[in-house]
Image: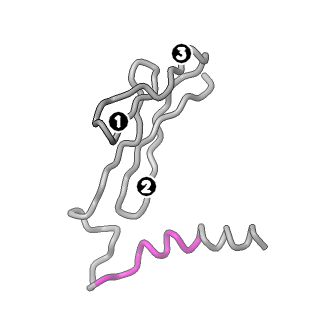
Amino acid sequence: MKAFIVAMMLVAGPAMAQINVQDETISSRPDDFEVEFLSWCEDNKVMGQNYSTGAVELRADCSTQGLTCKTYNIFRMNRSIYTAACVEK
């Protein structure tokens, strides 16, 4: 039953992105598009911004773990979210 509910949520998500609001499709409004960087790769290290101080800080050193830093891009309706993680070479 849980698998059915999760499957329905995955199918309903993209369908909801096409809902019309005042005759405008939400996903096609270029003035309402957001890009957000949660973390990024820099010299095989995962870096991020401390939102309290605004300073850039080290989140993980992939080299010391024998891993490689990789950036991922996630699309959600009118948002593009970038994040990074240490992965196997």
For the residues labelled 3 and 1, the Cα–Cα distance comes to 20 Å
Tag shown at residue 63:
3
Residue bearing mark 2: 75
Mark 3, Cα crowd under 10 Å, few <14 / some 14-19 / many 20+, is: few
Using residue 29 as the reference point, say whether residue 7 is left or right of it: right
In the rendered image, which quarter contains the C terminus? Answer: top right
Residue 20 lies in the magenta-colored region:
yes
Farthest-out residue, left: 31
Secondary structure beneath label 1: strand
**Front: mark 2 or 3:** 3
Numbered circles on residues, count:
3
Using residue 77 as the reference point, say whether residue 23 is left or right of it: left
Query: Would you say the residues marked 2 and 1 are in contact, meaning their CB atoms lie under 8 Å apart?
Result: no
Kind of residue at disc 2: Phe
Kind of residue at disc 3: Ser
In the rendered image, which quarter contains the N terminus? Answer: bottom right
Measured as percent of width and height from the top left, residue 87 is found at 59, 29
Kind of residue at disc 1: Gln
Residue range corresponding to the magenta coloring: 11-21
Residue 61 lies in the magenta-colored region:
no
Measured as percent of width and height from the top left, residue 30 is found at 23, 62
Query: Would you say the residues marked 3 and 1 are in contact, meaning their CB atoms lie under 8 Å apart?
Result: no
Q: How is the image coloured?
A: one colour
Residue visible at 61% across and 16% down? 66
For the residues labelled 2 and 3, the Cα–Cα distance comes to 28 Å
Secondary structure beneath label 3: helix
Rendering quarter of residue 48: top left
